[in-house]
Image (tube, rainbow, N blue to C red):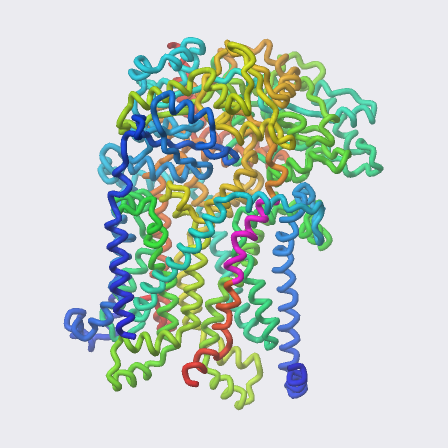
Amino acid sequence: MPSISLNRIKSKKPLDLAFDLAVILICVIMFFVVAYPIYFIIIASISDPTFVSTGKVLFTPKGFSLFGYEQIFADSRVWIGYRNTLFYSFFGTFINLLLTLPAAYVLSRTEFRARRFLMFFFIFTMFFNGGLIPTYMLMRDLSLLDTPWVFIFNPLTVNVFNLIITRTFFENNIPHEMYEAAVMDGCSHFKFFSTIVLPLSKAVTAVIGLYYLVWHWNDFFTGLIYIRNYDLQPLQIVLRDILLSNQVFSEGAGSGGTGGGYAQRYADQVKYGVIIVSSLPVLILYPFIQKYFEKGVLIGSVKG
Amino acid sequence: MATVQDTKVKVEPKVKKQTVFNTLARDYQLWIMILPAIICVIIFNYVPMYGIQLAFREYDFTAGLTGGDFVGLKYFEQFMNSHLFWDLIRNTLLISITTIVVGFPAPIALALLVNQIKWKRGKRILQTTVYLPHFISIVVLVGLLNVMLSPNTGILGLLLAKLGVEGNLLASVNAFVPIYVLSDVWQHVGWNSIIYLAALAAVDPQLYDAAKIDGANKWQIIRNVEIPAIIPTIIILLILNMGSIISTGFEKIFLMQNSLNLPISEVIETYVYKTGIVSNQFSYAAAIGLFNTMINFTMLVIVNTIAKKVSRISLW
Amino acid sequence: MVKSIRFFIVSCFFLILVACSNDNEASNEPTETEDGRVVLTGLITKHPLTKELENMEWLAEVEEKAGVQIKWEEVSADWDQKKGAMLASGEIPDIIIGPNAITDADFAQFPGLFENLQPLIEEHGPNIQAMFDEQPITKDLSTQTNGEIYGLSKYQQFWPETATMQFINKQWLDNLGLDVPKNWDELFDVLMAFKEEDANGNGDPNDEIPMDFAPIGEGGFGYFHPTVLLGSTGMTITGGGGQGYILEDGQVKNFFVDERYKEFVSFLHKLYANGLINEEAFTQDYSQYQALARGEGDTAKIGFTFGWESTDRFGLNVSDQYVTFDPMKVSADSDSDVSWSYDYNELNYGVNFIQMSSQTGNKEAAMKFINELYDPEVSLQILFGSIGPNIEKTGDQSYKILPPQDEEMDPGTWKWTSTWADNGPMFISDELEVELPVDMQAVDEQQEPFNKAFENLDRENDVFPGMLLKYSQEDHNAMTLVNTDFMNIAISKFGEWITTGGIEEQWEGYKQQVEQMGLQSNIDIIQKYYDEYKGQ
């Protein structure tokens, strides 16, 4: 590899070389700008919060302690929360894609007469909604309250934003000739969609799959409003409770005049620790999805 | 809305005879594929919409959600007569427009940049790094801003002081919007660039080869091959962004508010929270919500119409 | 592949059907346990530290004694967001517990949702009746304007008269040969000395921060804010200031448009302009505020500040350097009485701690349970934890609060972990003799300077009776709207005037602007309710 890239550099036009240098420079600067705060969160999660708050922690951890993580993992609810969130995220995303991908395909077909009306029909819901109370009453009438289903079937099951993104992708990246050719071969929409469109659309599937998955992963509102049984609560609710139990006194003396900051000491450590505990699994996932964004990988795979 | 319909009719008069009904037999497969999504949206999005009328009624618990007295535009007037109304509109627009102006192009630039990197390992590391901040919760982000921008101890505060920016930025009315917007860009630029990366990944490699044979330099390749490939995505996202012209991130602004930046940081959503939600004034909250929706939706329709005329790309 | 698509679509419909028909599971619950106890549902807005209710020994005993078994839903966060939808849907648990978890405004907005407890108390509530008799104010706090009782108040006897105490670093004063300041002018000189000299003696004259206060919210003032200094001008604020409403000689006023407030803000500006107030006081968060006061090792960083109790505020390393001191006068020759923030009512009473749904199947049983909670001995356990691990019974009516089992834990955290603590309904009768934990004893000792300031206080006519006033829904909504606009101006001007000055030039215009927003109509409304209350 190194020798090849050396050859490449030699054979370059001077303008391109300058261009490459600029790219590298910007990337390096950007890397540090983005990476430093992340690094800071990591060292803050294992440092004494008093040092963090007073600006003594800059590049290395100070007053090392794992108290924050101990607090988080000592709580048995965390594991139940993880299990629930995993289920809601993967099953929920599966249902989301199941509904979104075919619908987006249909909306991308220019010969489909109802397409413009249906686009409007979907987009309208992005803006107009009945508000929380009617939705809550609907969930109650459907007996979805306090069940895992409410995480999967809710007003965002078909996320119109994702639907539009997918439709746009289908419109612009599935050549029209392909369908005509397929029809010649007696291919139905079902078959064309599943054998041609989906394999060609791994990138967008990966993207909206990721969007849906991360949405489910971070969703605490559903649990907050619709769930009363703690055994069904997702990880985010559990972590929020842990976070709060260490931060509670921040509003002053609290109700009834408790002491100000008794539990405050390790609040920040827990705060930073929670970020790491809650997002690590989604972060690990990203590199697997990343491969679908490699240049030309998709077209190549179909043609090859 | 009328304009959209009109143009449609004018542009495609010939195909008028094809109606939804006489194409039903032909398109039944398509209908089957989209029906689950339609049903889902009807149940979960359209059914609760009767709640919108709450904006025009008194909330009356005993009479049911829609049984209260009809009061017309009372709550809209109440909002518009509020002493803070124009401040709220100004602050909200200032924040959201700045966010769009700065935050919208950033992920596009990032995607094009990342796409230039040939060292695969480095590319992946950079991509993953810029994607990380998206997962930081807002509470932590605001805490991070507080610690880092502290004029005496924070790394950014100290750095800025060296560059001649004196004083406590968190206390400054002028610095609020830049801090809000830049931290927003920092947090979401990587995440938002994913969609463009996916679009770039779909570019036919033959196009690159062809451009190289033509002797195009890198800048020309970006302009003539890559940007055209992501233009549809850009336009669609821009339209959608304009449809949130009067929306701001409630939680972040709420947490960033302090007594010194309040003249600039009070926006519609924080106001709704303070008046409507905390004290259960459902009708008032619903009216302000609907006011926002109307502005956003109008904006979307306008921009969509323009986009359609200019680029022939549109949402519907 | 076609098959699999069809399968997907069919399975999708199936899932929707399953989801929709997944009913009747929740509602078919038994109304009695096998041993004949009535099954009720309950919700509590507890403190996030508080352990699960099923592990509280005292609660199990109370439930058994009352012949009920309660299925608890424990809420420790975001109750405001949860509440609206829950109340509007009309499906609420039989019993809801929490400090003002359901407000007077909720009772007005959701008529018929909550049970009028008045008749039930007469029949099944002797303990509650006893509280009303011993502490008549608790009856006022519980009763709506129409005479009905939806939410019950509480009484706990131990809490001090103010939550906010002022602390000064005595060691610094001694190092510099200074006395504790007795008025604002002396305070200015002391703070100047803290700033100019190396008060903490670590060799660096620039690391001392003369004065600091807690971050100020946009909704008004609260505990640990500098507004307590308004007491120097003779006015008595409550709860640290809130939205500025005060009572003087039976007249409702608002200090945000008072000349004395102007004087106070001008003084703070003088301090700020001289670099005597922490530059970050307005922008720091609470954890930064707390961390800063803990100093570095044995070196303190803060000269003059506010807090609940010294070890809580300053940590164990430097807390013994600080003392509380008498509220100051404005100047050596001012002759007005000096006051302070009077928080006794807020700290010892409270409104709407427990309420019952009107849908409750067995109201008698629910009332018996509520009544048990107001038994003084049970109440003490609600506040401090179960007899045994948390409390020792030393005599018929005397008790000793035990130190935390975990030695590293402080008494406050121990209390909040073990039980409902201050979030619970309770009646701790004055007849109980209780030996308090060390932190409360320390509070009592440090309170002394402030108790002196309250000796001459006319609690009838000079203390704003905040929670005693029960507004109609209409008035409440009107006041909320005005207060939101008003606070937006008042709090931001407060910050602006202190940091950049300008109060002299802007004062008249500001007063006019606030008047336009309807401040006077709010004052009139409150005055009306206050007069009605006093007339009773």
Task: Count the labels in the image.
Answer: 0
Horizontal side of residue C103 vs C292, given as left or right: left
Horizontal side of residue C274 vs C4, given as left or right: right
On the image, the x and y values in percent for residue B41 come to 28, 57
Q: Residue at 43% of width from left, 59% of height from top?
A: A213
Residue A257 or residue B227, whichever sits in front: A257
Q: Residue at 38% of width from left, 63% of height from top?
A: A162
On the image, the x and y values in percent for residue C478 come to 38, 30
Q: Is the magenta stretch mostly helix, strand or loop?
A: helix
Q: To which quarter of the image does residue C44 belong?
A: top left
- Quadrant placement of the N terminus of chain C: bottom left
Residue A100 or residue C167, whichever sits in front: A100
- Quadrant placement of the C terminus of chain C: top left
Does B228 lie within the magenta span? no
Q: Residue at 60% of width from left, 19% of height from top?
A: C231
Question: Magenta residues?
Answer: A269-284
On the image, the x and y values in percent for residue A175 come to 36, 81
Against A229, residue C516 (above or below) is above
On the image, the x and y values in percent for residue C370 come to 37, 21
Against C31, residue B231 (above or below) is below
Residue lying at the far bottom of the rendered structure: B213
- Residue B153 seen anywhere in this rendered image of the structure: no
Residue B293 or residue B264, whichever sits in front: B293
Does A270 lie within the magenta span? yes
Residue lying at the far front of the rendered structure: C35
- Residue A188 seen anywhere in this rendered image of the structure: yes
Against C288, residue B302 (above or below) is below
